[in-house]
Image (cartoon, rainbow, N blue to C red):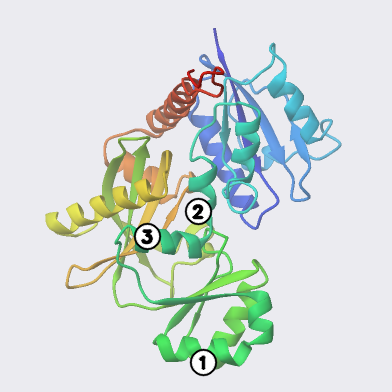
Amino acid sequence: MMKKIGIVYGGKSAEHEVSLMTAKAVIAALDFSTYQVTPIYITLDGEWVCGEKLTAPVEEAEALRFTGTDQPNSIAQFVELASNPETRFDLVFPVLHGPNGEDGTIQGLFEMMNLPYVGNGVLASSAGMDKVVMKQLFTQAGLKQVPYEYCLHSYYNAHKEEFLDACEQNLTYPLFVKPANLGSSVGISKAKTREELEAAIQFAFEYDRKIVVEQGITAREVELSVLGNDEPKVSIAGGVLPTKDFYDYSAKYVDGTTNYAIPAEITEQELSDLQQASIDAFKILDCSGLVRADFFLTTDGDVYINEVNTLPGFTPISMYPKLWIASGKTYAELVEELIQLGLERFEEKKHRAYTRDEDGSK
C-alpha cells in the first residue's frame, strides 16, 4: 500500500522563496510508485492551501504557489485531511524555512496531532532557530565560539548608545549583525564603523525583535551535514568560498556567485575535530533527522562553531545535500533516509508511557 506524504512548504517568512525551491527538489526525489504526495502550501499571508495529489514532480517551483482561488484554503482543511483515518498522512515532510516553520511552532502542531514528521522536534527547532539560545547551549557543551553581544529591540531603543559602546568595547571590527531568529543569511550585514553598525542593527531589527552582533574572524567557512537520530552520522566537510564580501542570501540562492570546495582542503585532524563538534552540537540541542553545522576554521586549526541550521535548504545548490552526495548518497537516498528517520522517531515515541495505574505502575 502506498504511503501518504504531505509536503508542507511556503510559509509566512522571508525565506518563502527558498522553501518553494526546496519543495520542488524534494518532490522530484520521491518515488511516486511508493508515495502518494499531497502538496500543502502556506501563503505569505499565512493561508493554508491543500493542493490536489500530485502524479509526478512539478516542472517549476512557481507551480507550487497556489492562491486562495485555486483550492479551498484554511488550516482546518489540513487538520481534517490529517485526522481522517481514510486520508491521514503517514508522514509529513515540512520544508518550511525561518519563523513559523523552522522554529518549533509547526512541529508543535504535528506533535499535538500525533503525526509522524521529518526533521527536528520542538525543542531542537526552537533552540536552533534562536541564535542566542543556541550560543548559550553551545557554551554549555564546551564548543568554542567567536565573541558576541545581543539585545532586544526594546532595550536598544532605550539604551542605544550603551549597547553600541558595549559592542565596540567588547568586540573588534569588522562586526556581523544578524536577526536572532532567521536563516539563509536574511537580514545580515557587515559593519566596519559605528555608523555602519547602527545601520546594520536597524536593518536586522526589521526582521526580528532580537539581534546578535558577532565579532568577525579571519578564518575559512566550513560546513558539515549531520544525519540521524540518537546515533548521528556526519558528512565530509565543504568549504564556502564566497566571491562577495560575505556569504549572503543572494550568494546562496540567487546569483550563484559562491564557490564551494567539496571536500574542503583540510587535514584529517581538522576534519575529525569538525565532525566531533558537529555531533556535540547535534546532541546538545537534542536534534533528530538533519542538521547543517557551520564553522570557522583558522589557519592554526582552531574550530569555532558559527551556528546550526535545523532545516537547511534542499535546493539543487544547497550545501546540505551536496555534502551527502559527495559522501556517497544520492539525493533520492537522502530524502528516503530522512523519511525513515522520521518514522523511526515516531515509533519510538509510541512506546512511551502516558498513563499510570493508581498504584503508580504503568
Label 3 sits on residue: 138
Q: Residues within 10 Å of mark 2 (few under 14, many from 20)?
A: many
Q: Residues within 10 Å of mark 1 (few under 14, many from 20)?
A: few
**Residue lying at 62% horizontally and 33% vertically, measured from the top left:** 110
Q: Earlier in the sequence, mark 1 or mark 2?
A: 2
Q: Residues within 10 Å of mark 3 (few under 14, many from 20)?
A: many
Mark 2: amino acid? Ala
Numbered label tally: 3
> Residues under labels 3 and 1: Cα distance?
26 Å
The furthest residue to the front: 359
**Residue lying at 43% horizontally and 72% vertically, measured from the top left:** 246
Mark 3: amino acid? Phe
Q: SS of the residue at dot 1?
A: helix
In the rendered view, tell whether residue 226 sits above or below residue 207: above
Residue 13 at what x, y percent from top left? 66, 54
Which of 150 and 10 lies nearest the eye of the viewer?
A: 150
Label 1 sits on residue: 165
> Residues under labels 1 and 2: Cα distance?
28 Å
**Residue lying at 51% horizontally and 33% vertically, measured from the top left:** 118
Which of 225 and 319 lies nearest the eye of the viewer?
A: 225
Q: Is residue 286 left or right of residue 77?
A: left
**Residue lying at 52% horizontally and 31% vertically, measured from the top left:** 28
Q: SS of the residue at dot 3?
A: helix
Mark 1: amino acid? Asp
Q: Is residue 24 left or right of residue 241?
A: right
User: What label sits on residue 127 in the rendered view?
Assistant: 2
Residue 193 at what x, y percent from top left? 49, 92
